[in-house]
Image (cartoon, rainbow, N blue to C red):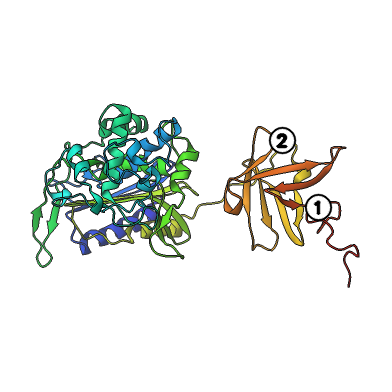
Amino acid sequence: MSPVLESTARALLRRIAVEQAQGRLPSLTAAVVRDGELAWFGARGRVEGIAPTPVTQYRIGSITKSLVAAVVMRLRDEGKVDLLDPVGKHVPGLQAGDVTVAQLLSHTSGLSAESPGQWWERTPGVPVAELVAGLGPEAAKHRPGRRYHYSNVGFALLGELVARHRGVSWAQAVHEEILLPLGMHDTTTRPRAPHATGYAVHPWADVLLPEPEHDAVSMAPAGQLWSTPADLARWAAFVAGDTGDVLAPDTVAEMREPATVDDGDAWTGGYGLGLQLARANGRRLAGHTGSMPGFLATVWADPSDKVGVLFTANSTAGVSRNLLTDLLAILDQHEPRLPAEWEPVADTAGLLELAGPWYWGPSAYALRLLPEGGVSLTPVGGAGRASRFTAQADGTWLGLDGYYAGETLRVVRRPDGSLSHLDLNTFVFTRTPYDPEAEVPGGVDEGGWRS
């Protein structure tokens, strides 16, 4: 992927320059990722007297959670963990052990946001056994599954689940199974040079206060990692679908599906399985924010056009929530992506006879062959139940999304082999409205259609 245009780079740089100056940030880096490659990197401020580079380390806080979640999903894909398993099956002795793995991944377990005792981000960590023993009935703040309630404790438990299955620490499992295969060699649990120092900026004066850094031990899976803009760019590409051999693209797509939302029906923010979700300016973004004392970071990716954006900063506060969406808007304004050239696709599967209009009662639907394979069934008028389907080995079709996700579509033929109708989980679609030959719904009146 070629770098962004010079005019685009200037606009992006100006945006982060304004952010660094107005937010009074000791240093700020940002990057744009396109088609899996770093297309632009910018930095403002200083780290140890010099401008930060793509390999300067910053703490990434809760972005750590997404990496832990990726190992959990590997365990699921290997058949070692079911997302509906109670976590107590994998972490015995836990009083809140009836919450499921999926609920922990999606922050719907109802568990407390923070661990017992003092604030874990600013005090020395405690062993896992002590954390588990301290999670009594009071740790349950909501009925499991009732609502979104962000829980750092939940990801501490997922880290322990990973450790018990792999026989190594959660960090070693993440390193071996996620970081090394993706080439993220500069993501570590403790800082390595060159790295930024975390600071708090005085609210009423331009002076700094160094922030603490320590090993969070049992709470570390919730936010321990340090990383670089270059490594986070690779992670953005992963979230956008460039998953390598770490996870199947379908599994990462499952992680990006909204499991819960945190701001009502017309949601702009939500959570999948270990990934935060957002909708902004027509985009559906997946990734994660991160904060620890002295540091802020965020990664967002849009799989629809394989674009990602990220920032890192060494300040406890001061980065506006719209920084990254502004960078995406600049990219869209200066370099709108061109649609791929249309090319004809051969009907190698012999599906052309299925294409065209079908009717569910009086409602018209269009079945279209998709260029990437599979078919879509969509209401002609636009409103109604629409889904995509993929072929199965037994000749049926599996719904991928919408109302019919997970449901089975069958092509029913007459004894002579000609098409009769489509059976979509008992809904019969015919070539004519209320086809009298169809058993259900069939011709509803012997007199037929009339004026």
Q: Earlier in the sequence, mark 1 or mark 2?
A: 2
- Residue 66, image quadrant: top left
Q: Which residue is mark 2?
A: 349
Question: Does 5 sit above or below residue 268?
Answer: above
Categorize mark 2 by other alpha carbons within 10 Å: few (<14), some (14-19), many (20+): few
Which residue type does callout 1 highlight?
Answer: Arg
Residue 286 locus on image (x, y percent): 41, 50
Residue 45 locus on image (x, y percent): 19, 53
The residue at 73%/38% (across/down) is 347
Q: Nearer the viewer, residue 150 or 187?
A: 150
Q: Nearer the viewer, residue 308 or 384?
A: 384
Name the secondary structure under disc 1.
loop
State left or right for residue 404 relative to residue 312.
right
Which residue type does callout 2 highlight?
Answer: Ala
Question: Mark 1–mark 2 contact, CB under 8 Å?
Answer: no
Residue 358 seen anywhere in this rendered image of the structure: yes
Quadrant (top left/top right/bottom left/bottom right) for the C terminus: bottom right
Quadrant (top left/top right/bottom left/bottom right) for the N terminus: top left
- Residue 323, image quadrant: bottom left
Residue 431 is labelled as 1
Question: Does 203 sit above or below residue 141?
Answer: below
Label 1, label 2: how far apart the Cα atoms are? 21 Å
Name the secondary structure under disc 2.
loop
- Residue 201, image quadrant: bottom left
Residue found at the very far top of the displayed protein? 167
Residue 263 locus on image (x, y percent): 39, 64
Q: Nearer the viewer, residue 373 or 309?
A: 373
State left or right for residue 41 relative to residue 359.
left
State left or right for residue 211 relative to residue 447.
left
